Amino acid sequence: MPKCPKCNKEVYFAEKVTSLGKDWHRPCLKCEKCNKTLAAGSHAEHEGKPYCNQPCYAALFGPGGFGRGGAESHKY
């Protein structure tokens, strides 16, 4: 039986969500920064941890500078 990477408990078929190559409990698949519950396939990954695409992943690992992207936010 696979174990959830978040809580280390067994994941049964009825409660399984597969994402990032692992099986999770649906409530355990949350953004590492804001704790928002994520749907499989609709999020980003960094070092094996899930993040919501906007705003967390973009703010933490996107282009540097200010804002959330666009020409004015890049560092030169």
Image (spheres, grey):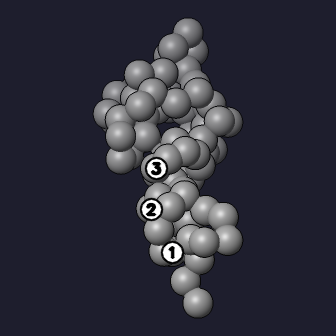
- Where disc 2 sits, the SS reads helix
Between 58 and 9, the one nearer to me in the picture? 58
Q: Nearer the viewer, mark 1 or mark 3?
A: 1
- Residue at image coords 67%, 71%: 71
Q: Residue furthest bottom?
A: 76
Quadrant of the frame with the C terminus: bottom right
The x and y percentages for residue 61 are 51, 65
Disc 2 marks which residue? 60
In the rendered structure, the answer to whether residue 6 lies left or right of residue 24 reads left
Q: CA distance from mark 1 to mark 3?
A: 13 Å
Q: Amino acid at mark 3?
A: Cys
Q: Amino acid at mark 2?
A: Leu
The x and y percentages for residue 50 are 49, 46
In the rendered structure, the answer to whether residue 37 lies left or right of residue 72 reads left
In the rendered structure, the answer to whether residue 9 lies left or right of residue 15 reads left
Vertical order, 70 against 52 (above or below)? below
Vertical order, 21 against 35 (above or below)? below
Label 1 packing within 10 angstroms: few (<14), some (14-19), many (20+): some
- Where disc 3 sits, the SS reads helix
Residue 6 visible within the image? no
Between 3 and 35, the one nearer to me in the picture? 35
Q: CA distance from mark 2 to mark 3?
A: 6 Å
Q: Are marks 2 and 3 in contact (CB under 8 Å)?
A: yes
Q: Amino acid at mark 1?
A: Gly
Disc 3 marks which residue? 56
- Where disc 1 sits, the SS reads loop
Label 3 packing within 10 angstroms: few (<14), some (14-19), many (20+): some
In this rendering, the count of numbered labels is 3
- Residue at image coords 46%, 50%: 56
Disc 1 marks which residue? 64
